[in-house]
Image (spheres, grey):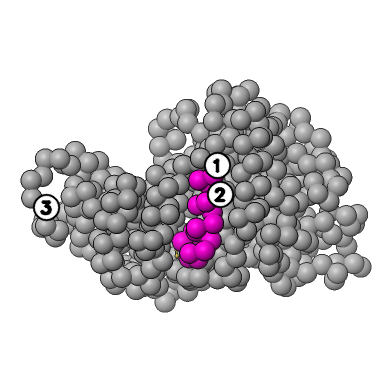
Amino acid sequence: MNILVITPFRKGKLIESVVSNIMNYEVVNTAPLQLCTYLKSQGHDVEYISMQNIFRSYKDEDYERLKLIIHSCKFDVLVFHTDYYMNNTNTATIFSIKLISDIVKKMDKNKRIIYCGKLTEMLEDELLQLLPNIDIAIRGESELVINSFIEEKNINFDNYKKFNGCLLNIDKKIVNRRGANYIDDYNKLPAIDFSFLDKTIYLIEKYIMKVTKLPISIRTSYGCPYACNFCKNTKDWNKYRVKSSLIIRKEIENLKRSCNGKLELVFLSDELFTLNKKHVIEVCKVLEDNEIILNGLFSHLNNLNEEMIKYISRISRSILIGLESCNNTAIKYADKNININNIFKLAKLVKENKMAIGLEWIIGLPGITIEDELRDLNAMYIFIANNIVDFIEPYILVPHPNTEFCKNNLKYNIEITNCYEEMLEEGGIPQISYNELNRKQIYVLYLISNIVISEAYKAQGHIKDKMIQGDMNIKEFKKIMELFNE
Ligand code: SF4
């Protein structure tokens, strides 16, 4: 069977509305390549396009080009893959899945379209209501079941009961088959073949720019033991599994050999790379043997210690931690399960080991007032100006479907507007508001946080004594916030 696998694209980020031809590369996510490799091992002819890398700041004028690319591919089955773990590669792509699936069904209404990713579990029937051209949406990790969906010529009301863990679109009726698919051992899947990226590189070079090194992010573990209220939204989220160092070694060899040396491993997508010490040591050894230095990886305040930091310092330039806020009430509301004060000791250890430490920080967490947000902004300034951390990445809180904040929004007094294409942490229009903060104010706070961080960088080096946190002018700040009362 000829299969085309596509990573759909999101709307451009805020900065891409300002500059739509930014000349740097989008980091490639390898989850769809895992699926391509598996499908090839089952005897299919597979082609892959990472549309996110080609249309990262999509405008209406790009439609003809999108159509041209789809029409140039030869396929019987189209598979969308949006990743099983990352929220920000899922929700906001619904609009491009719609665009692309419309093009495909207009080409030939008999081409089968299958969806793989988190959206099935996040949205259930609503997914097929929004995307009526999708024939099958698989719930959970699809590798071990997708073949049965591809090989069944006609899925209808006589045979649908043999399929579970999916949504089926049969004669325009949505059939919801319960259950979720789950890969208990990723090591049973073939090592990822990175040569599937040849076509994406060809298209980037044809339409955008010459590719020297396309940045790649691989995954060495799956799942996370925590359940933060803004993040966890799938049933098997807490089942943490790792890939063996043998497979990772093979994948890195494949990566180095593929695409004429135009790929560069720069990041680990693992939600929590540092949960298992043995795994950390083994992966670090593989990367060290291959002389790879990553730009960064994620860790957690509760799972990072001096020994691990020493190992990681051999293979990464930075460690990124989700601190989210300095406000204990907001942290508790979010069920973040951290002691904020631990960041100081940890950041010092990371810096002593010659790595940069960065924080993710959420703007608009429930349970927070304007005064609390001002305290958080003040803390951001102090963290950077005093060189406690090296960078901070502020994000707007996004109420991704099926998260605790989304499912039980009334319990947290949250109002949600479900414009999925705007659900972008990096500057999408906020889809959440509550008594203390409306959407405009959350957006302005996000913009202000970027000003605060850039001002704090300017202050670095001019501060003789360490600045003390918490000296603010709430009265003046409230005046600014009042400008954005709805
Ligand atoms: S620790 Fe991080 S990855 Fe895990 S649930 Fe919380 S935010 Fe998500």
The number of callouts visible is 3
Name the residue at 90% across, 67% down: 159
Tell me where residue 174 appears, x and y as whole percent. 75, 64
Q: Spatial distance from mark 3 to mark 1, Cα to Cα?
A: 41 Å
Badge 3 is on which residue? 466
Amino acid type indicated by mark 2: Val
Of discs 3 and 1, which sits in the foreground? 1
Tell me where residue 327 appears, x and y as whole percent. 27, 66
Q: Which mark is residue 290?
A: 1
Tell me where residue 477 appears, x and y as whole percent. 16, 54
Per the image, label 3 sits on a secondary structure element best described as loop
Beta carbon of the mark 3 residue lies under 8 A of ligand 1: no
The dominant secondary structure in magenta is helix
Beta carbon of the mark 1 residue lies under 8 A of ligand 1: no
Label 3 packing within 10 angstroms: few (<14), some (14-19), many (20+) = few
Magenta-drawn segment: 272-290
Contact (Cβ within 8 Å) of mark 1 with mark 2? yes
Q: Nearer the viewer, residue 21 or 238?
A: 238
Name the residue at 38% across, 68% down: 302
Choose top left, top right, bottom left or bottom right for residue 283: bottom right
Q: Quadrant of the N terminus?
A: top right
Label 2 packing within 10 angstroms: few (<14), some (14-19), many (20+) = some
Q: Spatial distance from mark 1 to mark 2, Cα to Cα?
A: 6 Å
Per the image, label 2 sits on a secondary structure element best described as helix
Mark closest to the chain's N terminus, 3 or 1: 1
Amino acid type indicated by mark 1: Asn
